[in-house]
Image (cartoon, grey):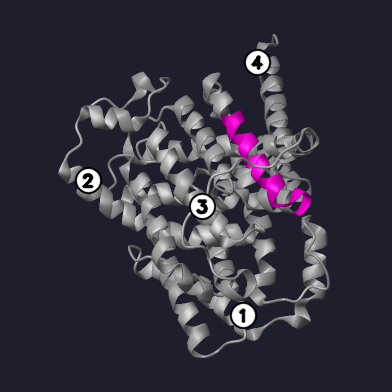
Amino acid sequence: MPDGSATAHTYRPKLATVLAEGYHLGHFRRDVLAALTVAIVALPLSMAIAVASGVSPERGLYAAVIGGFLVSALGGSRYQIGGPAGAFIVLVAATVAKFGLDGLLLTVFLSGFMLTLIGLLRLGSLIRYIPHAVTVGFTCGIAVTIFASQIKDLGGLKLPGAEPGPLLPKLAMLGQALPTVSPAALAIGVGSAALIFLLRRLLPNWPGMLIAVVLASLAAWLFGLPVETIGSHFGQLPDGLPSPRLPSFSTSLVLDVLPAALSFTLLGAVESLLSAKVADGMTGRKHRYNMEVVAQGIANVASAIFGGISVTGTIARTATNIRAGGVSPVPGMLHALFVLIFMVIAAPLASFIPLSTLAGVLVVVCWNMAEKEEFLHLLHDWRGAGVVLATFGLTLIEDLTVGIIAGCALAAAFAIVDRIRRAAPD
């Protein structure tokens, strides 16, 4: 069977190719089991990412249902799983703080159109050439920033005012609030993270995140622990999807959110194609990069219409799908339906989940997201060190877009200097 290299540039969803090749009952059985496994991982993560992004947890579930379904149905990868991603937490939180929920939905909506345009203009292949040191630098920077954003909920801290967005002022305020730490919240948050790490080491096939969330919720309820929960903070989750509607917009608001939409677009394209590339490495197949970007764009437009946050390809869930035996885009579509079934049947149960537990889940996500070994390896070469440190530092101090642009510019400068030196006569 060909690996798909010959058709990597075409605009045809992988689902259509799979169905044309022949999709049998045996394939479906494997895909159903993979979809259940992915849904178990996606459920707590989608809520945790939404809460960390400054919106209510159902916004993450909407993105998982709508975006996750469309990414798989229309995408250029057989194995890609779409949904809310930890890498977007910083951007989403900053956008909500500055423009509110309406501004966020408009940003996601616009970024969806931009992603679609990038794919249709066949620019998806260019995004794949972002230097490795840049992707390592901004990924590690995002991981550190997300971890800092979870300290408040992890320890149940009471801040004297609104939590600052920039890293250094945030850390200063968190330091001042340390005396208000809640022992119960801290124990649940740290205990949840520790349990996930332990289960991953001893029982890697068990759904560690879901187990930690369930046990922490039971403990908080049975012992009446004084911790903030989803129910006490957000109220009960809705038991289904909202009616679709276009985001509110005006010319002035579009102009205001445009820079944020560009950042969403850049990160969405990079993350989705990076995830698809990881899937290629695990399976020996090739994804259709332009089709994948078009699908990501359509998924983001639809997610915004249904009130969801941004959507991208997710490495952890995609890898889970492959390890669980998924053989087509069907698991991604079914996992979205399983998440929707949870909303319809068991939404009231989510009210018992402690916020510190979701923070613990994201601490694990941050640890897994940071490419620690690659970061240290790049420091051994002065060019790689310069690029990764510049990207990492500017992502922390300024923002993701500045970090990526600076890192790419520095990498390009090093490449030009090397070419000039090689071309110069001895």
Side (left or right) of 380 relative to 315: right
Residue with the most extreme left position: 25
Dot 1 crowding, Cα within 10 Å, few <14, some 14–19, many 20+: many
Q: Element type at marker 4?
A: helix
In primary-sequence order, the first of circles 1 and 4 is 1
Side (left or right) of 131 relative to 1: right
In primary-sequence order, the first of circles 2 and 1 is 2
In primary-sequence order, the first of circles 4 and 3 is 3
Residue 273: in magenta span: no
How far is disc 1 from disc 3 in space, using C-alphas? 27 Å
User: Which residue is at the front of the view, 62 or 316?
Assistant: 62
**Foreground: disc 3 or disc 2:** 3
Tell me: residue 297, above or below residue 325. above
Label placed on residue 28: 2
How far is disc 2 from disc 1 in space, using C-alphas? 42 Å
**Foreground: disc 2 or disc 4:** 2
Label placed on residue 185: 1
User: Which residue is at the front of the view, 277 or 188?
Assistant: 188
In primary-sequence order, the first of circles 1 and 3 is 3
Q: Residue 260, how many percent across, how many down? A: 72, 40
How far is disc 1 from disc 4 in space, using C-alphas? 59 Å
- Give the labeled residue for mark 3: 62
Q: Residue 388, how many percent across, how many down? A: 66, 42
What residue is drawn where x is 36% and y is 20%?
7
